[in-house]
Image: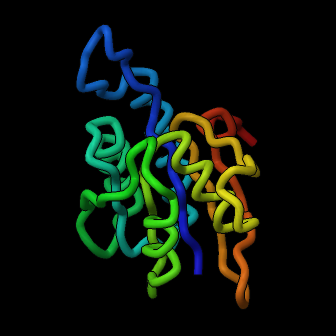
Amino acid sequence: MPVYLVQHGEAKPETEDPLRPLTDCGREGVQRVARHAAPLKLPVSEIRHSGKLRARQTAEILAAALAPGRDVRQMDGLAPGDDPGKARAVVESAVEPLMLVGHLPHLSRLASLLLVGDSGREIVRLRDGAIVCLVKVEDRWLLQWILTPELASVRS
């Protein structure tokens, strides 16, 4: 079963807007990723996001394209400085494919915790607006693929 970790899109600096919504470029990057991912029919049952505006906006854009089975909702434990162990427990107990939209360094630490059991080792470097797909095979997690806004822009 897959889990999708998503770094929110590019956000405005705090000096420009303390709420840090997505920039126009950030919104477009997430929309490119969403348009690229939609025909893949990713099995996403639910999208959860941190309480920060930029994560909610990113989750809403992805939900519009991916049509998860349930509503988008906020989840505690996805903020930048949160302990990745809390999100790991949610991922490990999930019975359906889940998408988590959050922040650095938390998502990088979560990916490392799932992949190698050590949140302090950077294994995956997330980018603004990118989706990282991890799959559980037997008793371990594997990196299946990463889709960045730049890759979603490439035409075949």
In the figure, is residue 18 to the left or right of 13?
Answer: left
Q: Nearer the viewer, residue 133 or 39?
A: 133
In the figure, is residue 57 to the left or right of 65?
Answer: left
Quadrant location of the C terminus? Answer: top right
Q: Relative to 120, does residue 137 appear above or below in the rendering? A: below
Q: Residue furthest bottom?
A: 138
Q: Relative to 52, does residue 139 appear above or below in the rendering? A: below
Residue at image position (69%, 39%) is 151
Q: Tell me residue 56's x, y (percent).
A: 29, 45
Specify the quadrant of the image occupied by residue 24. top left
Q: Relative to 41, does residue 106 appear above or below in the rendering? A: above
Q: Tell me residue 155's x, y (percent).
A: 70, 37
Specify the quadrant of the image occupied by residue 113. bottom right
Q: Nearer the viewer, residue 62 or 46?
A: 46
* Visual colour scheme: rainbow
The total number of labels drawn is 0
Quadrant location of the N terminus? Answer: bottom right
Q: Residue furthest top?
A: 15
In the figure, is residue 74 to the left or right of 49?
Answer: left
Residue at image position (52%, 48%) is 106
Q: Tell me residue 107's x, y (percent).
A: 54, 50
Residue at image position (35%, 46%) is 61
Q: Tell me residue 153's x, y (percent).
A: 63, 34
Q: Nearer the viewer, residue 133 or 32?
A: 133
In the figure, is residue 26 to the left or right of 15?
Answer: right
Residue at image position (45%, 63%) is 99
